[in-house]
Image (spheres, rainbow, N blue to C red):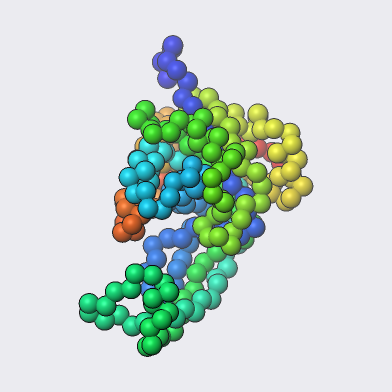
Amino acid sequence: MSRGEAMPRFLMFTLAAPMASFGGVAVGERRGGWERPTASALLGLLAAALGIERSQEADHIALASSCRFAIRVEQPGRPFADYHTAQVPPQRKGRRFATRAEELAADDLETILSRREYRSDVLSTIAIAATDTAPYTLEALAGALRQPSFTLYLGRKACPLALPLAPRIVEAEDVVAAFSRHDAEEPTRIRGFRQDTGYASQPNYIAVDRRIMPPHLAGSRIERRRDLPESRRRRLFAIRDEVIIHGVAGRAP
C-alpha cells in the first residue's frame, strides 16, 4: 500500500454453532461437507440478514459477485453423519411436480436413503472485502447482521448460532492483518462470552479467497472449491480458489 492510499476495510464477525452443515458437491446418496463455511453458505447468511428472498435471483448474483471472503478456522469441529430417508415418486419422462405436496400425493412413492455430513462445535472468524461496485456497503452488511430480516443458521435450519455475530468494520494493511486487528479490538463482553461457552480455541489456519490474497505472503497450498453461486434457481456454482495459510498468529483465549 502506497503512502496516502486509503487503508483497506473489512467486515469481521464470528461464526459459532453447536452444529453446522457446510455441504460440498451433492451427488448421489452420500452428501459430504467441508470443515469451514463455503462461499455459498456465507452469501446465504448475508442474503438472509438483508432480507433477500430466494426468488430474487439477480440480487443474489449481485451480492455474490461483490464479496470476497477470508475464513480463519479456529474449531473445525467433529464430523458426524445424519442418516436420512425420504419418499419420492420415481422419475418418468414428461413427469414434473411443482411442489413437494404434489410429490407426496403420488400413488407410487419410493424410499431413498442418504447420509449427510455435519460438524459439531464449529468456530470461525470471517473477513469480508467488498468490490467498488458492491450493491451493499460494509456498513449495510454489518447492520443487517446485527438485525437480520430472517433467522440466521449455519447450513440448515436445525443449526442455530451459538454466539452473537458481533460484526464490526476493521481497517488494516491486508486481510490477514485484519484478523490481528480484530483480535486486539474484540469487545470484552464477546471475548468473555466466547470463553464461557467453550469457543476459545487457538486459530488453526486461514483460507483466503485468491482474489484478495496479500502478494507478500505465501500460502501452503491452494484449494479449489465449487461454491460460488451462478444461479440459485438452477443450483449452478462456479469454481473459486482459496489460499491456505498456516502459522499465522491469532487471538489468545
**Residue 179 sits above or below residue 90 on the image:** above
**Residue 46 sits above or below residue 98 on the image:** above
What residue is rendered at 70% in x and 39% in y?
Answer: 190
What residue is rendered at 60% in x and 39% in y?
Answer: 146
What residue is rendered at 44% in x and 84% in y?
Answer: 111
- Foreground of the two, 14 or 225: 14
Position in image of residue 155 (x %, y %): 51, 57
Q: Can residue 248 be seen in this view?
A: no
Count the labels in the image. 0
State the quadrant of the C terminus: top right
**Residue 221 sits above or below residue 215 on the image:** below
Q: Residue furthest left?
A: 94
What residue is rendered at 46% in x and 50% in y?
Answer: 44
Position in image of residue 170 (x %, y %): 55, 28
- Foreground of the two, 228 or 220: 228
**Residue 20 sits above or below residue 218 on the image:** below
Q: Say whether residue 116 is left or right of residue 163.
A: left
Q: Say whether residue 159 is left or right of residue 30.
A: right
Position in image of residue 89 (x %, y %): 36, 82
